[in-house]
Image (cartoon, grey):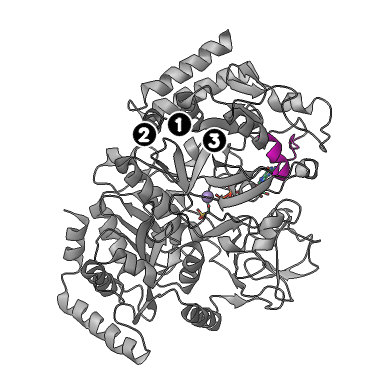
Amino acid sequence: MTGVGVLRLLQSNVSARQRARKNTLEEGKNRGEVATMTNNAVLNTWIEEMAALCQPDHVVWIDGSDEQRDALRAEACKTGEMILLNQEKLPGCYYHRTHPLDVARTEDKTFICAAHERDAGPTNNWKSPEEAYTEAANYFRGSMRGRTMYVIPFSMGPVGSPFSKIGVELTDSIYVVLNMLIMTRVGKKVLNALGTSADFTKCLHSKAQLDPDKRRILHFPEDNAIWSVNSGYGGNVLLGKKCLALRIASALAYKEGWLAEHMLILGIEEPNGYIQYIAAAFPSACGKTNLAMLIPPEGLKSKGYRIWTVGDDIAWIKIDTDGRLWAINPESGFFGVAPGTNSKTNPNAVATVQRDTIFTNVALLPDGTVWWEEGDGDPPSEALEWKGSPWKPGMKDKDGKPIVAAQPNSRFTAPLRNCPSVSFRLEHHHGVPLSAIIFGGRRNTLAPLVYEAMNWNHGVFLGASMASERTAAQYGKLGEVRRDPFAMLPFCGYHMADYFKHWIGIGRKAPRPPRIFHVNWFRRDEKGGFLWPGYGENLRVIEWILQRTRDEGKAVKSPIGYLPAPDAFDMTGLDLPKGTMEKLLEVNKDEWRAECDAIEEFFNGLGPKVPWELRNELEGLRHRLEE
Ligand code: GTP
Ligand code: SPV
Ligand code: MN
């Protein structure tokens, strides 16, 4: 049975549906609501069906106007969903707390509901569409009684760009509406672009009771649909982001011959005005937002670089007619990690969140401003911590561990246009051309600061064998090293081995593909400290990467790829302790042999579809380690 068939069965109670429609129409009229904003019959019918299932008291269309946004902000403050922050210090800024058991993506409640389990592959949770729809419909049924269903037409990518995809999210959360207004392009202009087409992603979300056991984040690639229920946390409920722009889009991209990736996009302009763009895939909470907004370090300032931020989380990439890969950021805002963001580590992010920003799960100060660990200034003498209880510095829990004021995965939602380094090409329908693709993760040991792949397939191998320590961005054991190929483990909407094959194929089809690199900002010394200062200083590494793409830059061949020559980086203004650079670039053959075994085990776990090209790369690496 198709998904639609299941729905029909669930909702065969036609009179209930008609009643729901009549109610929403009549009550809506009283509130000045419009019955619909489009003559798109597919869209209208679907909304009617979903309203019949969820039974909201009202249906409200989001038109993208400032007036409606302001009214929703006011309403959210009235209901307590949002708290208005100090408008003198933080104009247009609001504060939100999620449920304490709902603070990160729940990967174990996230499913790819393809018709066949083999299409989801071994790295995804799978449910049959029938089972998923039936179970979730029970949670959705009546979940919006006493609430309003908001209809959010949104575009991922500039409205009307050949890259772009349209979605419509139905939600009972004003917090979701206000976030989507920042993160995506919303409203009438999107409906106009859609016209009467049925080509849009049907996104249904309800907070329901926020019951963690009944939480489900369901993707139906064959129906172009997403159902999310019992959560209010960003990555689970802002359905344009990870659900559409990565899980659904990656499956679409596989069919249509492009790439949907968990990557930042950044432009580096030289004083002569020439801009080179790079994209980088790091797992969640591994430095994408920070790198995307980098500020050149003092020592390199005289070189006159300018940095342009295109995106910090997602890239959609296509082969263009010039044979190069071009990329857009489908989002229009940042949903960034707050802790660790300060005027030293990321001044552009600090500037970005001074207005029109929603802060989630950070600490709230008595003067109506916000704070987080390793933010600006000393810890406040008093605050309400992220759950809303009084907090003072030095407080410990019953096990003697310090109590944090901000949840480690607390976030800010801010418009891209607020960022001082925002790219002027954001609305360009063809995006930006990529000179380099960078992979990276958190590795205490093993991976050097940077190395270059020997060719495209070797580069794909670097992406496929990526690993990183687990962070607070997802539930699970912090610090544990897990394989996270292309930083897409939680986001690839189809079989991971097919995804690898797709990447190999892109290199074959693109006459002028970018060069591929691997970086590790997180290598540690014996005492556990970071060997590399990171943040702005990372430009020194990027500079070498760009030189390499122009066939400049000094490199030495190693078993794992090309390493920078000892004097390859411009180190003006940065004094690393003696021997540190050697440690950063060290390739320990024993560690790498063990790594080869771990990669082989991982590939074996993916089954027989792993491309032979990647098996060859693994054997090539083993061979070079013995030379
Ligand atoms: P998601 O939004 O979850 O996809 O994360 P992200 O990849 O954008 O990570 P983000 O830039 O927010 O960084 C996460 C954490 O890593 C923050 O605590 C940063 O302070 C820290 N971080 C970022 N860049 C560096 C770096 O170069 N060196 C070190 N040591 N830490 C970094
Ligand atoms: C990530 O976890 O990679 C994020 C935040 O960018 S979320 O939107 O929650 O997925
Ligand atoms: Mn992310």
Give the amino acid type for the residue marked by disc 1 in the picture: Arg
> Is 539 covered by the magenta stretch?
yes
Q: Is residue 620 left or right of residue 494?
A: right
Check if mark 2's residue and mark 1's residue have beta carbons within 8 Å: no
Q: Which residue is found at the position 63% from the left and 44% from the top?
A: 268
Nearer to me, 9 or 431: 431
Give x and y (percent) for residue 243. 41, 54
Looking at the image, is mark 2 or mark 1 earlier in the sequence?
2
* Of callouts 3 and 2, the N-terminal one: 3
Q: Which of the 4 quarters of the picture holds residue 503?
A: top left
Q: Is residue 541 above or below residue 161?
A: above
Mark 2 lies on a secondary structure that is helix
Q: Secondary structure at mark 1?
A: loop
Gap between marks 3 and 1 measured at Cα: 11 Å
Residue 436 image label: 3
> Furthest-bottom residue in view?
30
Residue 291 x %, y %: 63, 46
The C terminus sits in image quarter = top right
- The residue where tag 1 is placed is 512
* Image point (76%, 61%), residue name: 395
Which numbered mark, 2 or 1, is in the foreground of this view? 1
Q: What label does residue 502 carry, if any? A: 2
Which residue range is magenta in the image? 528-541
